[in-house]
Image: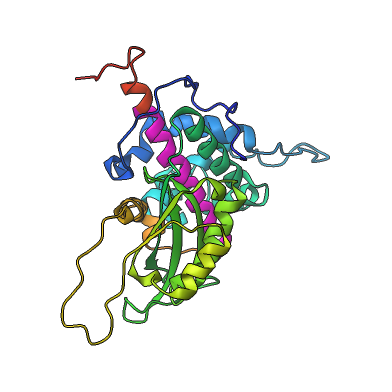
Amino acid sequence: MVIHRSSGWLGFDPECDPNNDDTVEDLDIMRALEPEVVDAVWAAIEPLIPPVRDDHPLGCHRPRVADRLCFWGILIRLVTGCSWVSVELILERQVSDTTLRSRRDEWIAAGVFDQLRVDAIHAYDRIIGLDLGEVALDGSLHKAPCGGEGTGINPTDRAKLGWKWSIAVDANGIPIGWAIDGANRNELNLLGPTLDDVARAGLLAEIDTMHLDRGYDYPKTRRHLASYGLADLNIQHREPRGATERRPLELGLRWVVEGTNSWLSNYGQLRRNTDRRTRHRHAQLCFVTALLITAKLIDWRDRWSPDSRPIR
């Protein structure tokens, strides 16, 4: 397994009791802007930012804008979904929209957001523990009015341009892997890339049961999942053609991934994405995952008691 349990995050004790039955739905979107969450994520991201060489021969160029301010601007845009120009105005022109975009691209090229995501998942698994006994997977469609790569006609939004993510989550709604593409891509085509992303994190082998909705109820899908070593499946059955009575819904944990999709959709830039590059959308999902996990860990710290008695 790739998870490094020695990694640190927020200074939590790794010996905490791992019994936590809260789901992602309990988290409020505005918690991403709470000072405690912001400071914790910045403390994790700051060491990942590569140093910048200051080799101007005269040393008289304009001073570089602080990374902390750029981080705050990127976060504001992610949460609200506003434009870069609006972020510049919100920050009282302390940083330009051009600088914000270029700093984001610098961090993406340096792998900052990818590593932030990995460190956050490692921290969650070390402190609380990923529950991979029950994993749910599903897709979610959203707007992309500016088009660009990785977008397509949204069949559920009057053929407007949109994008889609396919995401796998553990039993508590923590994202463990995803794939993104245009809104016109069938979810079955994103199943393999999503599982590949989970495998790159070293988590695929630990999955016991996979929960999927009826859109995946095809023999080809079952064979595909079997090739990944996933044989214990809970897939909602499709209604046969000509059926006069609907089958009762089967028990499962598909609602967990629906809760995660709903929580992610509260972020303005994910719900209505105006970026034109797939790498930008991927970085946003990495960032949101870190915010989600940080809020969960803060709640865990505030509620944990050494004697393990219920806190009333």
- Which residue does the image show at 29% across and 42% down from the upper left? 28
The answer to whether 280 appears left or right of 19 in the picture is right
Q: Give yes or no for residue 235 being in the magenta stretch.
A: no
The answer to whether 155 appears left or right of 246 in the picture is right
Residue 112 versus residue 216 in the image, above or below: above
- Which residue does the image show at 40% across and 41% down from the upper left? 292
Q: Would you say residue 146 is visible in this rendering?
A: no
Q: Specify the farthest residue to the front.
A: 231
Instruction: State the colouring used for the structure image.
Output: rainbow
The answer to whether 156 appears left or right of 290 in the picture is left
- Which residue does the image show at 40% across and 70% down from the upper left? 216
Q: Specify the farthest residue to the right.
A: 57
Q: Specify the farthest residue to the bottom.
A: 242
Q: Nearer the viewer, residue 212 or 59?
A: 212
- Magenta residues, start to end: 276-299
Q: Specify the farthest residue to the top.
A: 307
Residue 307 versus residue 122 in the image, above or below: above
Q: Quadrant of residue 249?
A: bottom left
Q: Could you tell me residue 89's position as x and y percent? A: 41, 49
Question: Is the stretch drawn in magenta largely helix, strand or loop?
Answer: helix
Q: Quadrant of residue 158?
A: bottom left
The answer to whether 28 appears left or right of 296 in the picture is left
Q: Nearer the viewer, residue 139 or 38?
A: 139
Q: Could you tell me residue 105's position as x and y percent? A: 61, 53
Q: Would you say residue 289 is visible in this rendering?
A: yes
Q: Could you tell me residue 184's position as x and y percent? A: 44, 77
Q: Could you tell me residue 259's position as x and y percent? A: 31, 51
Q: Quadrant of residue 299?
A: top left
